[in-house]
Image (cartoon, rainbow, N blue to C red):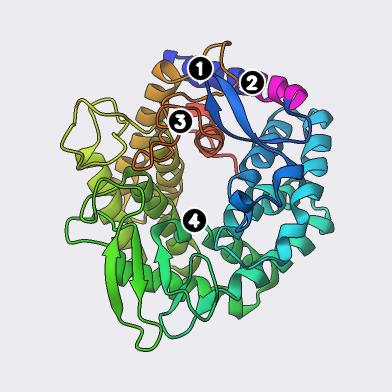
Amino acid sequence: MNTAEKVYKQALDYALSKIEKNMEELNDSFPFVTVNGKWELCKEEDWDLEIFSDGYWCNGFWIGMLWLAYKVTKNNKFKRKAYELCKLIEPRKNSNKIHDLGFLFYPSFCVGYDITKDGYFKRVALTAADSLLSRFNDEIGAITVSGDLQESGLTAIDTMMNLPLLWWVYEKTGNQKYYDVAYKHAATTMQHFIREDGSTYHVIEFDLDTGQVKRKYTLQGYNDESCWSRGQGWGIYGFALAYKYAKEKEFLITVGRLANYYIANCLPNYVTYWDFNDPEIPNTIKDSSAAAITASGLVDLSNVEPDKTRAEKYEEMPYKILETLSKNYLADNSSQGILLHGCFDKTNNIATDSSLIFGNYYYMEALVKSNFGFKGKDRWRY
Protein backbone atom coordinates (compact mmCIF):
# COMPACT_ATOMS: atom_id res chain seq x y z
CA MET A 1 0.00 0.00 0.00
CA ASN A 2 1.52 3.32 -1.07
CA THR A 3 1.38 6.58 0.87
CA ALA A 4 -1.69 7.92 -0.93
CA GLU A 5 -3.58 4.68 -0.37
CA LYS A 6 -2.76 4.83 3.33
CA VAL A 7 -4.07 8.40 3.53
CA TYR A 8 -7.42 7.44 2.01
CA LYS A 9 -7.76 4.25 4.01
CA GLN A 10 -7.00 6.04 7.26
CA ALA A 11 -9.44 8.82 6.34
CA LEU A 12 -12.23 6.33 5.65
CA ASP A 13 -11.56 4.44 8.87
CA TYR A 14 -11.65 7.72 10.78
CA ALA A 15 -14.92 8.75 9.12
CA LEU A 16 -16.46 5.39 10.00
CA SER A 17 -15.42 5.75 13.63
CA LYS A 18 -16.97 9.23 13.77
CA ILE A 19 -20.20 7.97 12.24
CA GLU A 20 -20.40 5.17 14.78
CA LYS A 21 -19.83 7.56 17.67
CA ASN A 22 -22.32 10.12 16.32
CA MET A 23 -24.93 7.43 15.81
CA GLU A 24 -24.80 6.63 19.52
CA GLU A 25 -24.93 10.28 20.57
CA LEU A 26 -27.54 11.66 18.19
CA ASN A 27 -30.31 9.10 18.72
CA ASP A 28 -33.18 10.21 16.45
CA SER A 29 -31.88 13.71 15.75
CA PHE A 30 -30.41 14.97 12.51
CA PRO A 31 -27.11 16.88 12.50
CA PHE A 32 -26.81 20.11 10.52
CA VAL A 33 -23.67 22.15 11.31
CA THR A 34 -21.26 22.12 14.23
CA VAL A 35 -21.11 24.91 16.78
CA ASN A 36 -18.00 24.75 18.95
CA GLY A 37 -17.48 21.19 17.76
CA LYS A 38 -21.00 19.99 18.65
CA TRP A 39 -23.71 19.25 16.13
CA GLU A 40 -26.56 21.74 15.90
CA LEU A 41 -29.53 19.40 15.64
CA CYS A 42 -32.83 19.34 13.83
CA LYS A 43 -35.01 17.22 16.07
CA GLU A 44 -38.24 15.62 14.92
CA GLU A 45 -40.26 17.61 17.44
CA ASP A 46 -38.82 20.85 16.00
CA TRP A 47 -40.05 20.24 12.45
CA ASP A 48 -43.32 22.09 12.97
CA LEU A 49 -41.52 25.28 13.96
CA GLU A 50 -41.72 28.18 11.53
CA ILE A 51 -38.00 27.99 10.73
CA PHE A 52 -38.58 24.52 9.25
CA SER A 53 -42.00 25.26 7.73
CA ASP A 54 -40.68 24.90 4.17
CA GLY A 55 -38.77 21.75 5.02
CA TYR A 56 -35.28 21.06 6.32
CA TRP A 57 -33.15 20.10 3.36
CA CYS A 58 -30.14 18.46 5.05
CA ASN A 59 -31.70 15.46 6.83
CA GLY A 60 -31.10 12.93 4.08
CA PHE A 61 -27.32 13.27 4.24
CA TRP A 62 -26.91 11.78 7.71
CA ILE A 63 -28.95 8.77 6.60
CA GLY A 64 -26.81 8.53 3.47
CA MET A 65 -23.67 8.40 5.60
CA LEU A 66 -25.16 5.53 7.59
CA TRP A 67 -25.89 3.64 4.38
CA LEU A 68 -22.33 4.14 3.17
CA ALA A 69 -21.01 2.97 6.53
CA TYR A 70 -23.15 -0.15 6.27
CA LYS A 71 -22.04 -0.81 2.71
CA VAL A 72 -18.39 -0.58 3.68
CA THR A 73 -18.53 -2.49 6.97
CA LYS A 74 -21.59 -4.77 6.59
CA ASN A 75 -22.32 -3.86 10.22
CA ASN A 76 -26.07 -4.15 10.71
CA LYS A 77 -26.25 -1.45 13.35
CA PHE A 78 -25.71 1.18 10.64
CA LYS A 79 -28.45 -0.42 8.58
CA ARG A 80 -30.89 -0.49 11.50
CA LYS A 81 -30.34 3.17 12.31
CA ALA A 82 -30.73 4.15 8.64
CA TYR A 83 -34.09 2.37 8.56
CA GLU A 84 -35.23 4.15 11.73
CA LEU A 85 -34.33 7.58 10.43
CA CYS A 86 -35.87 6.93 7.02
CA LYS A 87 -39.16 6.30 8.78
CA LEU A 88 -38.89 9.73 10.40
CA ILE A 89 -38.44 11.68 7.16
CA GLU A 90 -40.82 9.53 5.10
CA PRO A 91 -43.82 11.91 5.59
CA ARG A 92 -41.90 14.56 3.64
CA LYS A 93 -42.47 12.50 0.48
CA ASN A 94 -45.83 14.18 -0.04
CA SER A 95 -44.63 17.76 0.41
CA ASN A 96 -43.90 19.93 -2.61
CA LYS A 97 -43.15 23.14 -0.71
CA ILE A 98 -39.48 22.99 -1.66
CA HIS A 99 -37.24 21.70 -4.45
CA ASP A 100 -34.96 19.87 -2.02
CA LEU A 101 -36.67 16.50 -2.25
CA GLY A 102 -33.64 15.12 -4.08
CA PHE A 103 -31.34 16.16 -1.24
CA LEU A 104 -33.75 14.52 1.19
CA PHE A 105 -34.64 11.30 -0.57
CA TYR A 106 -31.75 10.38 -2.87
CA PRO A 107 -29.06 9.66 -0.23
CA SER A 108 -31.62 8.13 2.12
CA PHE A 109 -34.19 6.16 0.12
CA CYS A 110 -32.56 5.74 -3.31
CA VAL A 111 -29.20 4.69 -1.88
CA GLY A 112 -31.07 2.60 0.69
CA TYR A 113 -32.88 0.72 -2.06
CA ASP A 114 -29.72 0.19 -4.10
CA ILE A 115 -28.06 -1.38 -1.08
CA THR A 116 -30.94 -3.40 0.39
CA LYS A 117 -33.34 -3.90 -2.57
CA ASP A 118 -36.18 -3.35 -0.10
CA GLY A 119 -39.20 -2.21 -2.12
CA TYR A 120 -40.23 0.13 0.68
CA PHE A 121 -37.44 2.52 -0.25
CA LYS A 122 -38.33 2.46 -3.92
CA ARG A 123 -42.01 3.17 -3.25
CA VAL A 124 -41.23 6.18 -1.08
CA ALA A 125 -38.69 7.50 -3.59
CA LEU A 126 -41.29 7.27 -6.36
CA THR A 127 -43.78 9.32 -4.32
CA ALA A 128 -41.11 11.91 -3.51
CA ALA A 129 -40.19 12.12 -7.19
CA ASP A 130 -43.82 12.78 -8.10
CA SER A 131 -43.92 15.56 -5.51
CA LEU A 132 -40.79 17.07 -7.06
CA LEU A 133 -42.32 16.83 -10.54
CA SER A 134 -45.19 19.00 -9.39
CA ARG A 135 -42.76 21.90 -8.92
CA PHE A 136 -41.86 21.86 -12.63
CA ASN A 137 -43.12 24.93 -14.46
CA ASP A 138 -43.68 24.36 -18.18
CA GLU A 139 -43.56 28.05 -19.03
CA ILE A 140 -40.01 28.52 -17.74
CA GLY A 141 -38.89 24.93 -18.28
CA ALA A 142 -37.56 24.49 -14.77
CA ILE A 143 -38.29 23.25 -11.26
CA THR A 144 -38.96 26.18 -8.99
CA VAL A 145 -37.24 26.50 -5.64
CA SER A 146 -40.03 27.04 -3.13
CA GLY A 147 -43.32 28.74 -2.41
CA ASP A 148 -46.69 28.75 -4.15
CA LEU A 149 -46.48 26.88 -7.44
CA GLN A 150 -48.54 29.55 -9.19
CA GLU A 151 -46.43 32.44 -7.91
CA SER A 152 -42.82 31.28 -7.68
CA GLY A 153 -40.56 31.93 -10.64
CA LEU A 154 -37.29 31.28 -8.82
CA THR A 155 -34.88 28.48 -9.64
CA ALA A 156 -31.34 27.90 -8.46
CA ILE A 157 -28.13 26.12 -9.42
CA ASP A 158 -28.73 23.96 -6.33
CA THR A 159 -31.69 22.34 -8.10
CA MET A 160 -29.28 20.44 -10.36
CA MET A 161 -28.53 18.37 -7.26
CA ASN A 162 -32.18 17.45 -6.78
CA LEU A 163 -32.37 15.93 -10.25
CA PRO A 164 -30.59 12.71 -9.15
CA LEU A 165 -33.90 11.64 -7.59
CA LEU A 166 -35.61 11.98 -10.98
CA TRP A 167 -32.78 10.31 -12.95
CA TRP A 168 -32.81 7.43 -10.47
CA VAL A 169 -36.57 6.92 -10.68
CA TYR A 170 -36.42 7.04 -14.47
CA GLU A 171 -33.68 4.40 -14.42
CA LYS A 172 -35.74 2.17 -12.13
CA THR A 173 -39.12 2.59 -13.84
CA GLY A 174 -38.43 3.61 -17.43
CA ASN A 175 -41.18 6.22 -17.08
CA GLN A 176 -40.35 9.00 -19.52
CA LYS A 177 -41.95 11.77 -17.47
CA TYR A 178 -39.10 11.74 -14.95
CA TYR A 179 -36.48 11.87 -17.71
CA ASP A 180 -38.27 14.69 -19.51
CA VAL A 181 -38.45 16.99 -16.49
CA ALA A 182 -34.85 16.31 -15.46
CA TYR A 183 -33.67 16.89 -19.03
CA LYS A 184 -35.66 20.11 -19.50
CA HIS A 185 -34.52 21.53 -16.18
CA ALA A 186 -30.88 20.77 -17.00
CA ALA A 187 -31.29 22.37 -20.44
CA THR A 188 -32.80 25.53 -18.93
CA THR A 189 -30.01 25.70 -16.36
CA MET A 190 -27.42 25.26 -19.11
CA GLN A 191 -28.96 28.07 -21.13
CA HIS A 192 -29.27 30.67 -18.38
CA PHE A 193 -26.95 29.89 -15.46
CA ILE A 194 -23.57 29.38 -17.15
CA ARG A 195 -21.39 32.39 -17.90
CA GLU A 196 -18.94 32.61 -20.79
CA ASP A 197 -15.99 31.80 -18.52
CA GLY A 198 -17.65 28.64 -17.14
CA SER A 199 -18.68 30.14 -13.81
CA THR A 200 -22.26 29.98 -12.56
CA TYR A 201 -25.03 32.21 -11.30
CA HIS A 202 -26.77 31.19 -8.09
CA VAL A 203 -30.43 32.17 -8.53
CA ILE A 204 -32.59 33.25 -11.47
CA GLU A 205 -36.03 34.75 -11.30
CA PHE A 206 -38.27 34.09 -14.30
CA ASP A 207 -41.42 35.88 -15.38
CA LEU A 208 -44.15 33.27 -15.07
CA ASP A 209 -46.24 34.85 -17.82
CA THR A 210 -43.56 35.12 -20.49
CA GLY A 211 -40.94 32.61 -19.33
CA GLN A 212 -38.28 35.29 -19.71
CA VAL A 213 -35.48 35.96 -17.23
CA LYS A 214 -36.28 38.86 -14.91
CA ARG A 215 -33.01 38.93 -12.99
CA LYS A 216 -29.95 36.89 -12.04
CA TYR A 217 -28.58 37.21 -8.54
CA THR A 218 -27.15 35.44 -5.49
CA LEU A 219 -28.41 34.52 -2.06
CA GLN A 220 -25.16 33.17 -0.61
CA GLY A 221 -22.38 34.39 -2.88
CA TYR A 222 -20.28 37.57 -2.64
CA ASN A 223 -22.37 39.48 -5.18
CA ASP A 224 -24.70 38.84 -8.09
CA GLU A 225 -21.89 38.49 -10.62
CA SER A 226 -19.51 36.48 -8.46
CA CYS A 227 -19.12 32.70 -8.47
CA TRP A 228 -20.24 31.04 -5.24
CA SER A 229 -17.98 28.00 -4.96
CA ARG A 230 -20.55 25.56 -3.58
CA GLY A 231 -22.88 26.47 -6.41
CA GLN A 232 -20.10 25.68 -8.86
CA GLY A 233 -19.75 22.28 -7.18
CA TRP A 234 -23.49 21.67 -7.45
CA GLY A 235 -23.26 22.43 -11.15
CA ILE A 236 -20.30 20.12 -11.80
CA TYR A 237 -21.92 17.21 -10.03
CA GLY A 238 -25.37 17.84 -11.46
CA PHE A 239 -24.28 18.13 -15.08
CA ALA A 240 -22.00 15.10 -14.82
CA LEU A 241 -25.08 13.06 -13.91
CA ALA A 242 -27.20 14.78 -16.55
CA TYR A 243 -24.73 13.68 -19.21
CA LYS A 244 -24.52 10.18 -17.76
CA TYR A 245 -28.26 9.66 -18.13
CA ALA A 246 -29.13 11.79 -21.16
CA LYS A 247 -25.92 11.43 -23.20
CA GLU A 248 -26.55 14.97 -24.45
CA LYS A 249 -23.29 16.32 -25.88
CA GLU A 250 -24.05 19.87 -24.75
CA PHE A 251 -24.33 18.66 -21.15
CA LEU A 252 -20.84 17.15 -21.43
CA ILE A 253 -19.45 20.38 -22.88
CA THR A 254 -21.11 22.33 -20.07
CA VAL A 255 -19.79 20.20 -17.23
CA GLY A 256 -16.35 20.37 -18.81
CA ARG A 257 -16.49 24.16 -18.79
CA LEU A 258 -17.60 24.20 -15.16
CA ALA A 259 -14.89 21.75 -14.13
CA ASN A 260 -12.21 23.66 -16.02
CA TYR A 261 -13.24 26.88 -14.26
CA TYR A 262 -12.91 25.17 -10.87
CA ILE A 263 -9.54 23.64 -11.72
CA ALA A 264 -8.17 26.91 -13.10
CA ASN A 265 -9.31 28.96 -10.12
CA CYS A 266 -8.88 26.66 -7.13
CA LEU A 267 -6.07 27.10 -4.70
CA PRO A 268 -2.78 25.26 -5.08
CA ASN A 269 -4.09 22.83 -2.45
CA TYR A 270 -7.36 22.33 -4.43
CA VAL A 271 -9.74 23.61 -1.74
CA THR A 272 -11.55 26.79 -2.72
CA TYR A 273 -12.55 29.91 -0.91
CA TRP A 274 -16.27 30.31 -0.22
CA ASP A 275 -16.59 32.51 -3.32
CA PHE A 276 -14.11 32.59 -6.19
CA ASN A 277 -14.44 36.38 -6.48
CA ASP A 278 -14.28 37.57 -2.89
CA PRO A 279 -11.91 40.60 -3.05
CA GLU A 280 -10.59 39.68 0.42
CA ILE A 281 -8.85 36.57 -0.98
CA PRO A 282 -6.53 35.25 0.44
CA ASN A 283 -7.72 36.73 3.73
CA THR A 284 -11.13 35.15 3.71
CA ILE A 285 -12.67 31.80 4.54
CA LYS A 286 -12.69 28.58 2.56
CA ASP A 287 -15.43 26.03 2.01
CA SER A 288 -14.36 22.41 2.31
CA SER A 289 -17.88 21.28 1.39
CA ALA A 290 -17.54 22.86 -2.06
CA ALA A 291 -14.34 20.87 -2.57
CA ALA A 292 -15.94 17.61 -1.40
CA ILE A 293 -18.96 18.06 -3.67
CA THR A 294 -16.68 18.85 -6.61
CA ALA A 295 -14.47 15.84 -5.91
CA SER A 296 -17.44 13.49 -5.96
CA GLY A 297 -18.81 15.07 -9.12
CA LEU A 298 -15.44 14.85 -10.86
CA VAL A 299 -15.25 11.12 -10.15
CA ASP A 300 -18.52 10.75 -12.05
CA LEU A 301 -17.29 13.03 -14.83
CA SER A 302 -14.09 11.03 -15.27
CA ASN A 303 -16.19 7.90 -15.75
CA VAL A 304 -18.45 9.33 -18.46
CA GLU A 305 -15.99 11.55 -20.36
CA PRO A 306 -15.33 9.73 -23.67
CA ASP A 307 -12.11 11.57 -24.42
CA LYS A 308 -9.30 9.67 -22.73
CA THR A 309 -7.05 12.67 -22.15
CA ARG A 310 -9.79 14.74 -20.55
CA ALA A 311 -11.01 11.74 -18.56
CA GLU A 312 -7.54 11.29 -17.08
CA LYS A 313 -7.44 14.99 -16.19
CA TYR A 314 -10.79 14.76 -14.40
CA GLU A 315 -9.75 11.51 -12.72
CA GLU A 316 -6.62 13.05 -11.22
CA MET A 317 -8.35 16.04 -9.67
CA PRO A 318 -10.56 14.18 -7.13
CA TYR A 319 -7.50 12.40 -5.77
CA LYS A 320 -5.75 15.72 -5.23
CA ILE A 321 -8.79 17.22 -3.52
CA LEU A 322 -9.31 14.17 -1.32
CA GLU A 323 -5.65 14.02 -0.39
CA THR A 324 -5.73 17.65 0.75
CA LEU A 325 -8.99 17.22 2.66
CA SER A 326 -7.77 14.00 4.27
CA LYS A 327 -4.44 15.47 5.36
CA ASN A 328 -5.46 18.96 6.41
CA TYR A 329 -9.21 19.23 6.95
CA LEU A 330 -10.24 16.36 9.22
CA ALA A 331 -11.55 17.21 12.66
CA ASP A 332 -9.92 15.81 15.76
CA ASN A 333 -11.77 13.98 18.51
CA SER A 334 -12.88 17.23 20.15
CA SER A 335 -15.37 17.76 17.32
CA GLN A 336 -18.35 15.62 16.36
CA GLY A 337 -17.85 16.54 12.73
CA ILE A 338 -15.57 14.90 10.18
CA LEU A 339 -14.62 17.62 7.70
CA LEU A 340 -13.58 21.01 9.08
CA HIS A 341 -13.76 24.50 7.55
CA GLY A 342 -17.07 24.31 5.76
CA CYS A 343 -18.91 27.56 5.08
CA PHE A 344 -22.67 27.28 5.16
CA ASP A 345 -23.61 30.91 4.51
CA LYS A 346 -21.09 33.73 4.80
CA THR A 347 -23.50 36.33 3.44
CA ASN A 348 -25.78 35.82 6.44
CA ASN A 349 -22.96 34.82 8.81
CA ILE A 350 -24.29 31.32 9.47
CA ALA A 351 -21.80 28.54 10.27
CA THR A 352 -18.96 30.14 8.32
CA ASP A 353 -16.25 27.83 9.71
CA SER A 354 -17.96 24.60 10.70
CA SER A 355 -18.39 20.97 9.91
CA LEU A 356 -21.41 20.69 7.59
CA ILE A 357 -23.36 17.45 7.35
CA PHE A 358 -23.58 17.61 3.57
CA GLY A 359 -19.85 18.36 3.31
CA ASN A 360 -19.23 15.26 5.44
CA TYR A 361 -21.53 13.19 3.21
CA TYR A 362 -19.97 14.19 -0.10
CA TYR A 363 -16.47 13.74 1.30
CA MET A 364 -17.27 10.18 2.33
CA GLU A 365 -19.13 9.54 -0.92
CA ALA A 366 -16.11 10.73 -2.91
CA LEU A 367 -13.79 8.47 -0.92
CA VAL A 368 -16.06 5.52 -1.62
CA LYS A 369 -16.67 6.26 -5.29
CA SER A 370 -12.97 6.78 -6.00
CA ASN A 371 -12.30 3.36 -4.46
CA PHE A 372 -10.40 4.96 -1.60
CA GLY A 373 -7.77 6.27 -4.00
CA PHE A 374 -6.69 2.87 -5.27
CA LYS A 375 -6.11 3.57 -8.93
CA GLY A 376 -6.31 0.80 -11.46
CA LYS A 377 -9.14 -1.03 -9.70
CA ASP A 378 -12.78 -1.06 -10.64
CA ARG A 379 -14.61 1.73 -8.93
CA TRP A 380 -17.20 0.73 -6.41
CA ARG A 381 -20.70 1.58 -7.48
CA TYR A 382 -23.56 1.93 -5.03
Q: Earlier in the sequence, mark 3 or mark 1?
A: 1
The Cα atoms of the two marked residues, 4 and 1, are separated by 26 Å
Q: Residues within 10 Å of mark 2 (few under 14, many from 20)?
A: some
Dot 1 and dot 2 residues touching (CB under 8 Å): yes
Q: Earlier in the sequence, mark 3 or mark 4?
A: 4
Which residue does the numbered mark 4 point to in the structure image? 161
Dot 3 and dot 4 residues touching (CB under 8 Å): no
Which residue does the numbered mark 2 point to in the structure image? 18
Which residue does the numbered mark 3 point to in the structure image? 375
Name which residue lies at 24% across and 53% down. Answer: 199
Residue 190 lies in the magenta-colored region: no
Between 83 and 372, the residue placed more toward the observer is: 83
Q: Which amino acid type is shown beneath numbered disc 1?
A: Ala
The Cα atoms of the two marked residues, 2 and 3, are separated by 26 Å
Residue 15 x %, y %: 60, 23
Residue 23 lies in the magenta-colored region: yes
Q: What secondary structure is the magenta-colored segment mainly?
A: helix
Mark 1 residue element: loop
Name which residue lies at 45% across and 63% down. Answer: 242
Q: Which amino acid type is shown beneath numbered disc 3?
A: Lys
Mark 4 residue element: helix
Which residue does the numbered mark 1 point to in the structure image? 331
The correct choice, above or below, for 96 with respect to 241 in the image is below
The Cα atoms of the two marked residues, 3 and 4, are separated by 27 Å
Residue 123 x %, y %: 79, 64
